[in-house]
Amino acid sequence: MARTREDKIMRAFENKTWQEIKVKDSWQIFKIMAEFVDGFEKLAKIGPCVSMFGSARTPQDHKNYQLAEDIARLLTERGYGVVSGGGPGIMEAANKGAYEAGGKSVGINIELPFEQFHNPYIDRDKLLQFNYFFVRKVMFMKYSQGFIVLPGGFGTMDELFEAITLIQTGKIARFPIVLVGQDYWGGLFDWVKNRMLEEGNISPEDLNLYRLVDTAEEAAGHIFRFYDKYLLKPNF
Protein backbone atom coordinates (compact mmCIF):
# COMPACT_ATOMS: atom_id res chain seq x y z
CA MET A 1 0.00 0.00 0.00
CA ALA A 2 2.83 2.40 0.87
CA ARG A 3 4.49 1.76 -2.49
CA THR A 4 1.23 2.47 -4.34
CA ARG A 5 0.80 5.81 -2.56
CA GLU A 6 4.38 6.80 -3.36
CA ASP A 7 3.88 5.92 -7.03
CA LYS A 8 0.74 8.07 -7.21
CA ILE A 9 2.58 11.02 -5.69
CA MET A 10 5.49 10.63 -8.11
CA ARG A 11 3.16 10.49 -11.12
CA ALA A 12 1.23 13.56 -9.95
CA PHE A 13 4.41 15.64 -9.76
CA GLU A 14 6.09 14.21 -12.86
CA ASN A 15 7.43 16.85 -15.29
CA LYS A 16 6.41 19.75 -13.01
CA THR A 17 8.76 22.44 -11.78
CA TRP A 18 9.02 23.48 -8.13
CA GLN A 19 7.08 26.68 -8.90
CA GLU A 20 4.27 24.73 -10.58
CA ILE A 21 4.01 22.38 -7.64
CA LYS A 22 3.88 25.19 -5.05
CA VAL A 23 1.83 27.78 -6.94
CA LYS A 24 -1.46 26.70 -5.33
CA ASP A 25 -0.19 27.07 -1.76
CA SER A 26 -1.71 30.53 -1.28
CA TRP A 27 -5.16 29.32 -2.31
CA GLN A 28 -5.06 26.55 0.28
CA ILE A 29 -5.34 29.25 2.95
CA PHE A 30 -9.04 29.62 2.18
CA LYS A 31 -9.67 25.90 2.66
CA ILE A 32 -7.77 26.04 5.95
CA MET A 33 -9.74 29.10 7.07
CA ALA A 34 -13.01 27.36 6.26
CA GLU A 35 -12.07 24.45 8.52
CA PHE A 36 -11.23 26.83 11.37
CA VAL A 37 -14.50 28.76 10.98
CA ASP A 38 -16.63 25.62 10.84
CA GLY A 39 -14.90 24.14 13.87
CA PHE A 40 -15.08 27.30 15.97
CA GLU A 41 -18.76 27.88 15.22
CA LYS A 42 -19.84 24.33 16.06
CA LEU A 43 -17.67 23.64 19.08
CA ALA A 44 -18.20 26.98 20.82
CA LYS A 45 -21.87 26.06 21.34
CA ILE A 46 -21.29 22.72 23.06
CA GLY A 47 -20.03 23.76 26.49
CA PRO A 48 -17.37 22.22 28.75
CA CYS A 49 -15.88 19.05 27.25
CA VAL A 50 -13.17 16.52 27.96
CA SER A 51 -11.25 15.00 25.05
CA MET A 52 -10.36 11.31 25.10
CA PHE A 53 -7.56 9.80 23.04
CA GLY A 54 -6.25 6.33 22.28
CA SER A 55 -5.63 3.80 19.57
CA ALA A 56 -7.94 3.49 16.58
CA ARG A 57 -6.96 -0.20 16.48
CA THR A 58 -8.30 -1.24 19.88
CA PRO A 59 -10.96 -3.96 19.36
CA GLN A 60 -14.33 -3.84 21.08
CA ASP A 61 -13.54 -6.83 23.28
CA HIS A 62 -10.35 -5.26 24.69
CA LYS A 63 -10.30 -4.11 28.32
CA ASN A 64 -9.24 -0.62 27.25
CA TYR A 65 -12.36 -0.27 25.10
CA GLN A 66 -14.58 -0.93 28.11
CA LEU A 67 -12.40 1.34 30.23
CA ALA A 68 -12.88 4.21 27.78
CA GLU A 69 -16.65 3.64 27.80
CA ASP A 70 -16.71 3.75 31.59
CA ILE A 71 -14.69 6.96 31.75
CA ALA A 72 -16.95 8.66 29.21
CA ARG A 73 -20.03 7.61 31.15
CA LEU A 74 -18.64 9.09 34.38
CA LEU A 75 -17.80 12.36 32.63
CA THR A 76 -21.28 12.51 31.11
CA GLU A 77 -22.90 12.00 34.51
CA ARG A 78 -21.13 15.16 35.70
CA GLY A 79 -22.32 17.16 32.70
CA TYR A 80 -19.20 17.16 30.54
CA GLY A 81 -19.35 16.63 26.81
CA VAL A 82 -17.00 13.95 25.48
CA VAL A 83 -14.83 14.68 22.45
CA SER A 84 -12.91 12.08 20.48
CA GLY A 85 -11.13 11.89 17.16
CA GLY A 86 -14.32 10.41 15.76
CA GLY A 87 -12.84 7.14 14.54
CA PRO A 88 -12.88 3.50 15.68
CA GLY A 89 -11.17 1.88 18.65
CA ILE A 90 -10.79 3.96 21.80
CA MET A 91 -12.38 6.91 20.01
CA GLU A 92 -15.50 4.88 19.33
CA ALA A 93 -15.59 3.63 22.91
CA ALA A 94 -15.44 7.19 24.25
CA ASN A 95 -18.28 8.32 22.01
CA LYS A 96 -20.29 5.20 22.80
CA GLY A 97 -20.00 5.76 26.54
CA ALA A 98 -21.21 9.35 26.23
CA TYR A 99 -23.91 8.59 23.66
CA GLU A 100 -25.46 5.71 25.57
CA ALA A 101 -25.41 7.74 28.80
CA GLY A 102 -27.40 10.49 27.09
CA GLY A 103 -24.55 13.00 27.01
CA LYS A 104 -22.95 15.17 24.37
CA SER A 105 -20.88 13.02 22.02
CA VAL A 106 -18.52 14.95 19.73
CA GLY A 107 -16.34 13.60 16.91
CA ILE A 108 -13.47 15.58 15.39
CA ASN A 109 -12.67 13.31 12.48
CA ILE A 110 -9.72 13.45 10.07
CA GLU A 111 -9.78 12.42 6.42
CA LEU A 112 -7.22 9.63 5.91
CA PRO A 113 -6.56 7.22 3.04
CA PHE A 114 -6.76 4.33 5.53
CA GLU A 115 -7.99 3.36 8.98
CA GLN A 116 -10.09 6.40 9.88
CA PHE A 117 -13.87 6.41 9.43
CA HIS A 118 -16.30 8.03 11.81
CA ASN A 119 -18.06 5.82 14.33
CA PRO A 120 -21.87 5.60 14.77
CA TYR A 121 -21.99 7.01 18.32
CA ILE A 122 -21.45 10.68 17.49
CA ASP A 123 -24.32 13.17 17.73
CA ARG A 124 -25.27 14.04 14.17
CA ASP A 125 -24.84 17.78 14.73
CA LYS A 126 -21.49 17.31 16.50
CA LEU A 127 -19.49 15.50 13.82
CA LEU A 128 -16.76 17.61 12.24
CA GLN A 129 -14.56 16.55 9.32
CA PHE A 130 -11.04 17.91 8.81
CA ASN A 131 -8.37 17.53 6.16
CA TYR A 132 -5.60 19.17 8.18
CA PHE A 133 -4.19 17.62 11.33
CA PHE A 134 -3.02 20.98 12.67
CA VAL A 135 -6.50 22.51 12.41
CA ARG A 136 -7.99 19.47 14.12
CA LYS A 137 -5.49 19.73 16.97
CA VAL A 138 -6.38 23.37 17.54
CA MET A 139 -9.99 22.28 18.08
CA PHE A 140 -8.95 19.74 20.70
CA MET A 141 -6.78 22.28 22.52
CA LYS A 142 -9.23 25.17 22.37
CA TYR A 143 -12.41 23.40 23.39
CA SER A 144 -11.23 20.78 25.90
CA GLN A 145 -11.20 21.27 29.65
CA GLY A 146 -9.14 18.13 30.06
CA PHE A 147 -7.37 15.34 28.18
CA ILE A 148 -7.75 11.68 29.08
CA VAL A 149 -5.24 9.55 27.19
CA LEU A 150 -5.52 5.78 26.92
CA PRO A 151 -2.95 3.51 25.24
CA GLY A 152 -2.37 4.50 21.62
CA GLY A 153 0.21 5.03 18.91
CA PHE A 154 1.97 7.93 17.23
CA GLY A 155 -1.19 10.01 16.79
CA THR A 156 -2.02 9.69 20.47
CA MET A 157 1.53 10.67 21.40
CA ASP A 158 1.36 13.67 19.08
CA GLU A 159 -1.79 15.01 20.73
CA LEU A 160 -0.51 14.28 24.24
CA PHE A 161 2.85 16.00 23.91
CA GLU A 162 1.46 18.98 22.04
CA ALA A 163 -0.87 19.62 24.99
CA ILE A 164 1.95 19.23 27.51
CA THR A 165 4.16 21.59 25.48
CA LEU A 166 1.49 24.28 25.10
CA ILE A 167 0.69 24.22 28.81
CA GLN A 168 4.37 24.15 29.81
CA THR A 169 5.13 27.19 27.64
CA GLY A 170 2.06 29.13 28.78
CA LYS A 171 0.49 29.22 25.33
CA ILE A 172 -2.78 27.82 26.68
CA ALA A 173 -4.36 27.73 30.13
CA ARG A 174 -3.51 24.73 32.26
CA PHE A 175 -5.97 21.86 32.20
CA PRO A 176 -5.72 18.32 33.60
CA ILE A 177 -3.98 15.67 31.51
CA VAL A 178 -4.61 12.10 32.64
CA LEU A 179 -2.84 9.03 31.25
CA VAL A 180 -4.70 5.78 31.83
CA GLY A 181 -2.65 2.60 32.14
CA GLN A 182 0.48 2.83 34.25
CA ASP A 183 1.86 -0.38 32.75
CA TYR A 184 1.62 1.18 29.28
CA TRP A 185 2.76 4.72 30.05
CA GLY A 186 5.04 4.12 33.01
CA GLY A 187 8.18 3.30 31.03
CA LEU A 188 7.87 6.41 28.87
CA PHE A 189 7.41 8.75 31.79
CA ASP A 190 10.14 7.04 33.81
CA TRP A 191 12.38 7.99 30.88
CA VAL A 192 11.04 11.56 30.98
CA LYS A 193 11.96 11.76 34.67
CA ASN A 194 15.24 9.86 34.55
CA ARG A 195 16.64 11.36 31.34
CA MET A 196 14.88 14.61 30.44
CA LEU A 197 14.74 15.87 34.01
CA GLU A 198 18.11 14.51 35.08
CA GLU A 199 19.81 16.15 32.10
CA GLY A 200 18.13 19.48 32.81
CA ASN A 201 15.93 19.55 29.72
CA ILE A 202 12.73 20.02 31.73
CA SER A 203 12.00 21.43 35.19
CA PRO A 204 10.85 19.41 38.23
CA GLU A 205 7.45 21.13 38.19
CA ASP A 206 6.87 19.90 34.63
CA LEU A 207 6.28 16.43 36.06
CA ASN A 208 3.08 17.83 37.59
CA LEU A 209 1.58 18.60 34.18
CA TYR A 210 0.16 15.08 33.89
CA ARG A 211 -1.13 12.27 36.09
CA LEU A 212 -0.87 8.50 35.59
CA VAL A 213 -3.81 6.37 36.76
CA ASP A 214 -5.32 2.93 36.17
CA THR A 215 -9.08 3.07 36.72
CA ALA A 216 -12.03 4.92 35.23
CA GLU A 217 -12.84 6.40 38.64
CA GLU A 218 -9.30 7.71 39.06
CA ALA A 219 -9.28 9.24 35.57
CA ALA A 220 -12.62 11.02 35.85
CA GLY A 221 -11.99 11.88 39.50
CA HIS A 222 -8.81 13.79 38.63
CA ILE A 223 -10.81 15.96 36.22
CA PHE A 224 -13.52 16.56 38.81
CA ARG A 225 -11.07 17.50 41.58
CA PHE A 226 -9.24 19.91 39.31
CA TYR A 227 -12.45 21.83 38.61
CA ASP A 228 -13.54 21.73 42.22
CA LYS A 229 -10.52 23.99 42.69
CA TYR A 230 -10.34 25.94 39.41
CA LEU A 231 -12.98 27.63 37.26
CA LEU A 232 -14.02 26.18 33.92
CA LYS A 233 -12.83 28.63 31.29
CA PRO A 234 -11.70 28.77 27.64
CA ASN A 235 -8.09 27.75 27.05
CA PHE A 236 -7.26 30.61 24.64
Image (cartoon, rainbow, N blue to C red):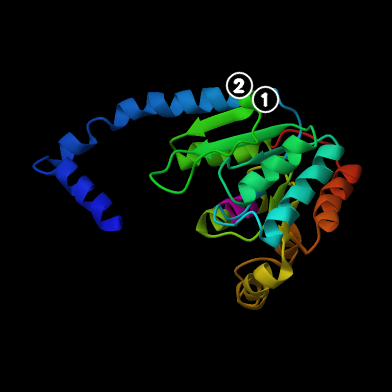
CA gap, disc 1 and disc 2: 6 Å
Name the residue: 73% across, 45% down. Answer: 146
Q: Amino acid at mark 1?
A: Ala
Instruction: Report whether residue 15 is seen.
Output: yes
- 225 or 18, which lies in front? 225
- What type is the residue that disc 2 sits on? Glu
**Residue at numbered disc 2:** 41
Q: Secondary structure at mark 1?
A: loop
Residue 118 is left or right of residue 181, and the answer is left
- Find residue 63 and report its image quarter: bottom right
The label shown at residue 44 is: 1
Q: Measured along the vertical axis of the image, is residue 19 above or below residue 39?
A: below
User: 236 and 127: which one is in front?
Assistant: 127
Q: Which residues are magenta?
A: 159-166
**Marks 1 and 2 in Cβ contact (< 8 Å):** yes
Q: Examine the rendering and report whether any part of residue 236 can be seen.
A: no
Image-based side of 235 in relation to 227, left or right: left
